[in-house]
């Protein structure tokens, strides 16, 4: 066995370096690092003569050949007798190649296309932050003090006009400043055309009039009327509705909520992603005639929602004990016609299953547990301020609140006043809202299981520009999603531990 000549080794090494730095290899970071390492090693070989032997065979006799073989191969010399070989520490060059950077979640359908025209540096930074990314009917208004002094109730504010669909005449396009960002051809699949149309109305339409609706014993509601020349012919997002006049509203109206209710926007998006479709469209908007100028949630006003009880603000009057009895008999499920002594209402059993899941993930208590009997409330919670927590000793007679259905559809609920709470720890979750429920909707549970909840929430919430910015951009939105994902894992553990059923509830 013979050793390659040092000249050939040098030639091979330099050829390898030349090939690596040539244009025949893709100029990736990894190849550039390898080429740099080869050049450094080649320089090291040239300067050090003790790594590759410089003596040619025959110049120093057999002793030189034995040393060369010992250094390069650590094998027996050609003479047939074994020589003692001194082991030398080789010169090792460690190359650290950085792993491929993990890309952020792809927000499909919302990423801004490349703009060919030149942009300022400030605009480029802002667009880059956005592309990397890529809080219904509710009750309560702060009263007259929230309105700017001297502001007439006939006000014009905002931009754009009503259109039947995205891109219709009068709608501001995405590039001209619409607050609903849809940069692809289609919106996310969980939104209907009526959803997108209602969101654009709430976010971008001009305001023609302001209506202040008084309610005995409650704070007044504040509605704004969007400009439009025609009404949608087919209902709203979750079910057909009537855009007819209500409290003087001649056009589609939006209900202005308080800034602290901004989580209702998150609730709307999550409702659509889970396939429940029971919430009313909601977006965030700045109302110029309000003093503080803070972004506020605005909800589509649905005049088909009727209230029969002003105390509970509900269409259906139920207390806790009658509610639990109706859950036991699974009213109207599987074609079952309830008996008079079952305490059943016109609401289908599956509606309670959807409501319980929805309220648990968002920790909405002011519906099924208005007295906060299932968790430890804070001092600022309504149930503590009004002393309702002290009435938990008699839970059976506590009324449910905001149980509402439409006038023409008594089987299905409409989720209103969906203010969620993201600051509640995992050891203080309200499991009382799940009590009595033994079946859950398959569409929602599958989304929680398949790991796509985060990606879909990011993609969906990115559409609402003002909500996205009000929560601190992607970093703030990710924190909210972290909370929902942890609760989802707890919920899945809960239903698995109890052996509860997961059923299709698409009727």
Image (cartoon, rainbow, N blue to C red):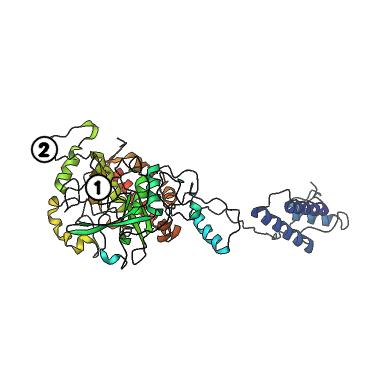
Q: Left of 402 or right of it: where is 425?
A: right
Considering every residue shown, the one lying at the far right of the view is 59
Residue 171 x %, y %: 44, 50
Residue 368 x %, y %: 22, 50
Few, some or many C-alpha atoms within 10 Å of disc 2 (few <14, some 14-19, many ≥20)? Answer: few
Q: Left of 116 or right of it: where is 392?
A: left
Secondary structure at badge 2 equals: helix
Q: Left of 419 or right of it: where is 13?
A: right
- Residue appearing at x 78%, y 64% in the figure: 47
Q: Is residue 462 above or below residue 353?
A: below
- First along the sequence among labels 1 and 2: 2
Few, some or many C-alpha atoms within 10 Å of disc 1 (few <14, some 14-19, many ≥20)? Answer: some
Considering every residue shown, the one lying at the far bottom of the view is 149
In the image shown, does 402 or 60 lie closer to the viewer? 402
- Residue appearing at x 23%, y 51% in the figure: 367
Q: Quadrant of residue 273?
A: top left
Residue 242 x %, y %: 29, 43
Q: Which residue is mark 1?
A: 434
Q: Is residue 102 above or below residue 121?
A: above
In the image shown, does 436 or 181 lie closer to the viewer? 181
Secondary structure at badge 1 equals: helix
Residue 237 x %, y %: 34, 43
Identify the mark at residue 341; answer none if there is no mark.
2
Q: How many marks?
A: 2
């Amino acid at each position: 066995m013979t050793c390659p000549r040092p000249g050939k080794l040098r030639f091979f090494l330099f050829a390898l370096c030349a090939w690596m730095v040539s244009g025949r290899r893709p100029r990736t970071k990894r190849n550039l690092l390898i080429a740099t390492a080869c050049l450094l090693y080649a320089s090291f070989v040239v300067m050090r003569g003790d790594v590759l032997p410089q003596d040619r065979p025959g110049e120093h006799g057999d002793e030189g050949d034995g040393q060369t073989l010992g250094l390069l191969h650590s094998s027996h010399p050609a003479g047939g007798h074994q020589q003692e070989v001194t082991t030398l520490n080789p010169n090792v060059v460690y190359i650290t190649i950085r792993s491929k950077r993990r890309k952020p979640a792809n927000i499909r359908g919302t990423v801004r296309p490349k703009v060919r025209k030149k942009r300022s540096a400030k605009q480029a930074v802002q667009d880059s932050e956005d592309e990397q990314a890529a809080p219904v009917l509710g009750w309560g208004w702060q009263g007259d003090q929230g309105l700017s002094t001297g502001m007439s109730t006939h006000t014009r504010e905002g931009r754009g006009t009503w259109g039947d669909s995205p891109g219709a005449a009068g709608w501001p396009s995405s590039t001209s400043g619409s607050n609903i960002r849809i940069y692809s051809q289609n919106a996310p699949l969980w939104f209907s055309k009526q959803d997108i149309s209602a969101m654009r109305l709430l976010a971008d339409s001009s305001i023609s009039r302001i209506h202040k609706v008084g309610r005995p014993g409650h704070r007044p509601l504040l509605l704004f009327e969007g400009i439009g020349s025609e009404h949608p012919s087919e209902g709203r997002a979750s079910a057909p509705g009537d855009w007819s006049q209500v409290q003087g509203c001649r056009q589609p109206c939006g209900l202005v909520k308080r800034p602290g209710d901004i989580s209702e926007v998150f609730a709307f998006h999550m409702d659509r992603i889970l396939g429940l479709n029971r919430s009313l469209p909601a977006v965030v908007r700045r109302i110029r005639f309000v003093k503080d100028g803070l972004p506020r949630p605005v909800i589509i006003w649905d005049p088909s929602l009727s209230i029969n009880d002003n105390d509970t603000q509900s269409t259906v009057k139920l207390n806790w004990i009658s509610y639990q009895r109706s859950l036991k008999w699974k009213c109207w499920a599987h074609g079952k016609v309830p008996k008079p002594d079952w305490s059943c209402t016109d609401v289908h059993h599956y509606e309670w299953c959807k409501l319980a899941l929805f309220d648990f993930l968002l920790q909405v208590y002011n519906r099924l547990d208005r007295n906060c009997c299932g968790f430890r409330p804070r001092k600022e919670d309504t149930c503590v301020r009004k002393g309702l927590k002290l009435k938990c000793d008699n839970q059976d007679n506590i009324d449910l609140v905001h149980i509402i259905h439409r006038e023409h559809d008594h089987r299905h609920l409409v989720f209103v006043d969906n203010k969620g709470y993201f600051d509640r720890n995992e050891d203080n979750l309200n499991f009382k809202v799940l009590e009595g429920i033994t079946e859950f909707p398959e569409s929602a549970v599958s989304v929680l299981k398949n790991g796509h909840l985060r990606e879909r929430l990011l993609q969906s919430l990115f559409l609402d520009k003002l909500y996205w910015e009000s929560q601190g951009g992607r970093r703030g939105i990710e924190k909210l999603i972290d909370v929902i994902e942890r609760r989802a894992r707890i919920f899945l553990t809960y239903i698995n531990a109890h052996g509860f059923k997961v059923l299709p509830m698409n009727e």
